[in-house]
Amino acid sequence: MIARLTLGIETSCDDTSVALVAEDGTVRALVSATKDLDHEPYGGIVPEIASRNHSILLLPLIDECLRKGQVSWPQISGIAVTNRPGLIGALIVGVVTAKSLSLIYKTPFLGVNHLEGHLVAPFLRDEEYAPPAGFTYPYVALAISGGHTSLYYVQGLGQYQLLGGTRDDAAGEAFDKFAKMLGLGFPGGVRLDKLAQSGNPSAYNFPRSMINDDNLEMSFSGLKSAGHRLVEELRTKLTPEEFQQNIPDLCASFQEAIVDVLLAKLECATRRLQCRKVVLTGGVSANSRLRARALEWTQKKSYSLVIPPLRYCTDNAAMIAYLGSLRMNQLHEQSDASLGPRTQSLPTDFSAFLP
Ligand code: KG4
Ligand code: ZN
């Protein structure tokens, strides 16, 4: 049987990504470009720069993806594009491109929700990764990235309850801001993780806001402010050399506070829902301490834990192509020329938690 392939386009933030995915989640090709260095001097993502990069990179990446997958247009049965939520200028590039390709090649297209893409990412597969045998809905998913930190109960395709999430900063944003305060550059989450490996997680006591509240809400802005105050204080008290020596301890302690909160909320969510399956997704799920502690916790509880490989956890078009394929083929959805970009999710994308 010839696999029906969906072309996915992702341009919601700073990553430009294109993929070809079959109906069963097999990734035929995935090509992405991230120009972190263009944003680094500004210490954060500059929307205008992101949009400009997408418009330069997207068409060549589509060509490269088709070449890599050894696919020509007649073999593509649908086009999926992230149209929400995200940076408006960045989304426009993807949406306009998808619409144009749909017209030229007479191929149906669908605008999909980026966060929903993260939620179905564990089902992707390739030569090196497949979801654990028998893995299926329902599961509790924690989507953690530079822009999002949210807990969902995923009951099936299109059935998602938003359980809770951060009220202010995302966990990745907190990592990046603290890394910047320490002079580690942007985005500094990965560098912070590396340095933390040789640090003492109990050296400094950072706040763990809302950790004991019996709800699934989180807050990381107090932690960020505490980090800022401590760094200022240490910079005046210590010599530059002494400060440098303290960086691993600062990283490990800051990281521990975030991981403690995330695990406490996961524990609360799985208990409330009586759910024994946990998925971590989004760029922060690469964090080595979070992975180790989540594994330890799930093993102790005999829960199953799925963390898709990094290429499917960070922003990528494979999850978008797969989600579009599911929705187009199973739910018979299709967008029309009126599709536009949206900075926020639609109210119907996720339902509220019904305890
Ligand atoms: O999902 P992602 O690639 O992009 C979006 O933000 O949508 O996530 C990027 C975020 C950044 O904040 C980055 O610093 C963080 O994930 N990150 C990490 C690690 N790797 C990436 N944070 C902590 N530890 C890591 N190892
Ligand atoms: Zn994302």
Image: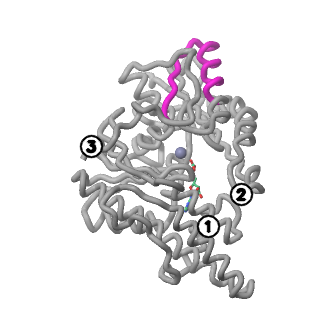
Secondary element at tag 2:
loop
Q: Which mark is residue 354?
A: 3
Ligand 2 is within 8 Å of the C-beta of the residue at disc 3: no
Residue 99 is inside the magenta segment: yes
Q: Which mark is residue 178?
A: 1
In the structure shown, which secondary structural element does the residue marked by tag 1 occupy?
Answer: helix
Earlier in the chain: of badge 3 and badge 2, it is 2
Amino acid type at mark 2: Gly
Helix, strand or loop at label 3? It is loop
**Disc 3 to disc 2, how far (Cα)?**
39 Å
Residue 118 vs residue 207, the one in the foreground: 207
The spot of residue 41 in percent (x, y) is: 77, 56
Q: Residue at x 35, y 55 (%)?
A: 216
Say which label, 3 or 1, has the lower sequence index: 1
Q: Which mark is residue 43?
A: 2
Q: Would you call the spot at circle 3 few (<14 residues within 10 Å), some (14-19), or many (20 or more)?
A: few
Towards the viewer: 42 or 81: 42
